């Protein structure tokens, strides 16, 4: 069995909620679902993205060959996470290096571009857990300094016409906020080594993506940023950076941009 198949997201908005599997789960299904739940919770605590392959490795070859069982296990795991832990499984996508268009004709480039857009080529699917609780019932953020850094970088990306921020430009903005350059690293009294925090943690955990364009590096939204924080909260954080001075029209435009409704302008 292809380990990228057999996992279907359960629609928690469907009548009766996600716990209606059609038939009562077997002892085997419950045991395997519990295994998936523990694995996803552990990955959540580590802030690590989980791929379908990661989940597939939890099953032996016999189970992986039984697609119906795998699907039921995954749906039941979603149910347990929602009903017992108040957590939802959310699909997110991370960019992957695709086929190069170098040397192709204009027609071939166009076909490759259309195929990538329609078939999701160049994106890998992952899962993360997010709280299903209303915002007012969620626990307070423990590290507000890190949240402030994430908010600042996200606002710079969202306000840029191309939805990305140049590394040099980012450093200049961070210097204005009290981040100091120490050798090759950035340092902040509360955050410590900002370079390590950004490169080793925030990018690895999927909050941001970093890519080279020529001799320059750029940061853009990562899959976890939208999935975990959400558009509404993201725009509100940006509004706080501007001391609550964003008008409703600007907020709505930012929400549309964050949701990907408006495409970035061409260079």
Image (cartoon, helix red, strand yellow):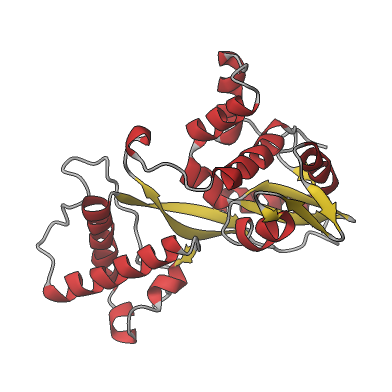
Residue 141 in percent (x, y) is at 46, 44
Left-right relation of 57 to 117: left
Residue 216 in percent (x, y) is at 86, 53
Residue 31 in percent (x, y) is at 20, 74
- Picture residue at 75% right of the left edge, 56% below the top: 211
Q: Quadrant of residue 169?
A: top right
- Picture residue at 90% right of the left edge, 56% below the top: 215
Residue 133 in percent (x, y) is at 31, 41
- Picture residue at 21% right of the left edge, 51% below the top: 83
* Residue found farthest to the front: 189
Q: Would you place residue 41 above or below residue 251 in this image?
A: below
* Residue found farthest to the bottom: 61
Q: Quadrant of residue 32?
A: bottom left
Give whichever of 176, 208 is nearer the camera.
Answer: 176
Q: Would you place residue 215 above or below residue 247 in this image?
A: below
- Picture residue at 46% right of the left edge, 72% below the top: 53
């Amino acid at each position: 069995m292809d380990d990228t198949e057999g996992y279907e997201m359960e629609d928690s908005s469907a009548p009766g909620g996600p716990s209606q599997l059609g038939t009562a789960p077997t002892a085997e299904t419950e045991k395997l679902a519990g295994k998936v739940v523990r694995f996803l919770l552990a990955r959540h605590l580590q802030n690590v993205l989980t791929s379908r392959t990661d989940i597939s490795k939890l099953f032996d070859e016999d189970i992986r060959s039984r697609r119906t069982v795998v699907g039921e296990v995954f749906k039941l795991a979603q149910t347990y996470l929602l009903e017992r832990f108040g957590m939802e499984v959310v699909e997110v996508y991370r960019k992957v290096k695709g086929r190069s268009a170098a040397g192709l004709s204009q027609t071939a480039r166009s076909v490759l571009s259309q195929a990538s857009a329609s078939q999701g080529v160049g994106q890998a699917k992952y899962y993360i857990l997010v709280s299903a609780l209303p915002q007012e019932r969620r626990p307070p953020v423990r590290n507000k300094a890190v949240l402030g850094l994430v908010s600042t970088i996200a606002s710079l990306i969202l306000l840029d016409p191309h939805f990305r921020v140049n590394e040099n430009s980012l450093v200049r903005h961070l210097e204005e906020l009290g981040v100091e350059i120490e050798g090759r690293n950035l340092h902040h009294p509360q955050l410590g080594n900002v370079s390590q925090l950004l490169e080793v943690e925030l990018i690895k955990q999927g909050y941001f993506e970093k890519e080279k364009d020529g001799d320059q590096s750029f940061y853009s939204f990562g899959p976890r940023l939208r999935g975990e924080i959400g558009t509404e909260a993201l725009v509100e954080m940006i509004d706080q950076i501007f001391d609550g001075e964003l008008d409703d029209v600007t907020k709505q435009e930012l929400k549309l941009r964050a949701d990907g409704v408006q495409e970035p302008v061409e260079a």
